[in-house]
Image (spheres, rainbow, N blue to C red):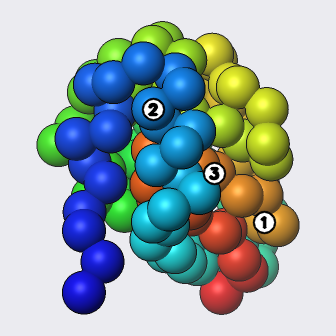
Amino acid sequence: MAESCISCNTGTRGEVLMAQNLVMQNLEFKLIVPLWGGSEYIELNQLLKLVGQCDSGGAGKVLVAGGTVLVDGKVELRKTCKVRTGSIVTLGGVRITVKAA
């Protein structure tokens, strides 16, 4: 069984990248878009909370501010970045794919 990579978030940037190559947990988040024209996105800090990578949106903001979150392969520092269908968010050893519901 693969080891969890949650502790990799506290290491140096090189350790996090090495851990991503060894163990990657894949999660899927289904984004529901209302027919009447509601939001077509989810804020990054809220996504991290909803998939269980942190306990609150505030904790998600701290993760993002630390530079450990990638959106579509690029470091994302905007805490409320709009994540849309088709985006891939990576945090330590976790890859979150956002899909339409």
Image location (x, y in percent) of residue 1: 24, 87
> Which is more foreground, mark 3 or mark 1?
3
Q: Are marks 2 and 1 in contact (CB under 8 Å)?
A: no
Instruction: Determine which quarter of the picture holds residue 96.
Output: bottom right
Please, what secondary structure does the residue beneath circle 2 have? helix
* Residue 44 in sight here: no
Instruction: Residue under label 2, please give it.
Output: 15
The location of residue 21, given as percent across then percent down, is 59, 57
Residue sitting nearer the eye, 80 or 65: 65
Which one is in front in this view, the residue at disc 3 or the one at disc 2? 2
Q: What element does badge 3 sit on?
A: strand
Question: Which residue carries the number 3 mark?
Answer: 89
* Up-down relation of residue 61 to residue 73 (above or below): above
Where, quadrant-wise, is the C terminus in this rendering? bottom right
Residue appearing at x 65%, y 69% in the figure: 97
- The residue indicated by pointer 1 is 85
What's the amino acid at mark 1? Answer: Thr
